[in-house]
Image (cartoon, rainbow, N blue to C red):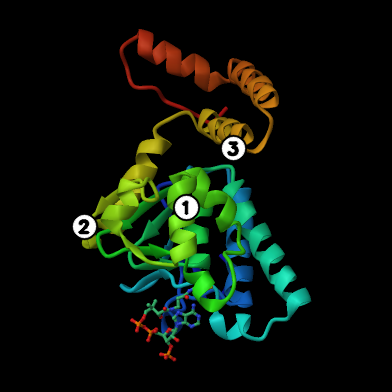
Amino acid sequence: MADRSYVRTGIRDAVATVTIDRQSRLNALNPQVMAEVDAAFAELRDRDDLRAVILTGAGDRAFVAGADIGVLARMGPVSGASVSREGQDVLRRIETFPRPVIAAVGGYALGGGCELALACHLRVASDRARFGLPEVGLGIIPGYGGTLRLSRVVGLGRALELILTGEMIDAARAAEIGLANVVVPHGELMERSRALARRIARNAPVAVELALKSVYQAIDGPAAHAQELEAALFGLLASTADMKEGMAAFLEKRKAQFTGR
Ligand code: COA
């Protein structure tokens, strides 16, 4: 893996872990961190031995405490729009990553950090996690896709409450509103995230990838197109060796051995 200053990648048992490590700033996202996160995912994208990715923040205090306010403070209207667009693009590439991406949130996930967690497909929170979109208190709005994604995940009323008040919520409340999929004891965060990844990895890899594609197409596009695509992907999966294996295994009362073909 490439040598980076702020982002580490490790792979074990077909599950990659991408760790953002800028602990002196609670893992805040400056342009270099963003570029390194983007590069780490680009490097993982072509690996067909991979079944899932876990994205996390180093240390005990933060997933990511937001975009770097020191950098944001210097932006003007034109550079501000590019900061937003470039951040949106990086997060969109995570959302469209072909394998499931799980955010393991063990502390602050604020502003851009909350938006980063929202761009992941699933969120595991430790009981020390805190989520929030404090941007309006800084005179800005969430600019990395958060105004769009939050309401999809928690519903319009709750999204507006979080965005307009800028208040933080704890892990239990995040799970109650669906922002976190599950809350786990802090010390078990990575193991429980890996267990979720391994559970997904037991399924047919191409089916998992096309399920993600179908679900996101359904929320992004018109219903008629989404249904068309779902039917086409469903048909495509009928051509895979894994479909034959999955169904044969069920009928023969044995465990399926998937090959990703
Ligand atoms: N950008 C830049 N620096 C940040 C940062 C961010 N988003 N979040 C934290 N830091 C820095 C702090 O400035 C501090 O640096 P210092 O040691 O040089 O003073 C260091 O990280 C530790 O944070 P600190 O504020 O001392 O910790 P705390 O426990 O008192 O508070 C938070 C933690 C998360 C509540 C607080 O850091 C905070 O509000 N951060 C900003 C969150 C935010 O608004 N994010 C959205 C940005 S759009």
**Image quadrant in which you'd find residue 162:** bottom left
> Residue at label 1?
159
**Is residue 241 left or right of 255 when viewed as pictured?**
right
> Residue at label 2?
185
Q: Secondary structure at mark 1?
A: helix
Depicted 234 relative to depicted 136: above or below: above
Contact flag, marks 2 and 1 (Cβ < 8 Å): no
Work out whether residue 72 can be spotted.
Answer: yes
Q: Secondary structure at mark 2?
A: loop
**Is residue 92 left or right of 161 when viewed as pictured?**
right
Q: Residue at x 37, y 8 (%)?
A: 251
| The furthest residue to the top | 251
Name the N-terminal-most of marks 1 and 3.
1
Depicted 137 relative to depicted 238: above or below: below
Judged by depth in the image, the label closer to the viewer, 2 or 1, is 1
Q: Position of residue 138 (x, y in %)?
A: 53, 77
Distance CA(mark 1)–CA(mark 3):
19 Å
Q: Residue at x 39, y 44 (%)?
A: 197
Distance CA(mark 2)–CA(mark 3):
30 Å
Name the N-terminal-most of marks 2 and 3.
2
Ligand 1 shown in quarter: bottom left
Work out whether residue 50 can be spotted.
Answer: no
Q: Amino acid at mark 3?
A: Tyr
Callout 3: few (<14), some (14-19), or many (20+) C-alpha neighbours within 10 Å? some
| Depth check, front residue: 185 or 178 | 178
Callout 2: few (<14), some (14-19), or many (20+) C-alpha neighbours within 10 Å? few
Q: Secondary structure at mark 3?
A: helix
| The furthest residue to the right | 78
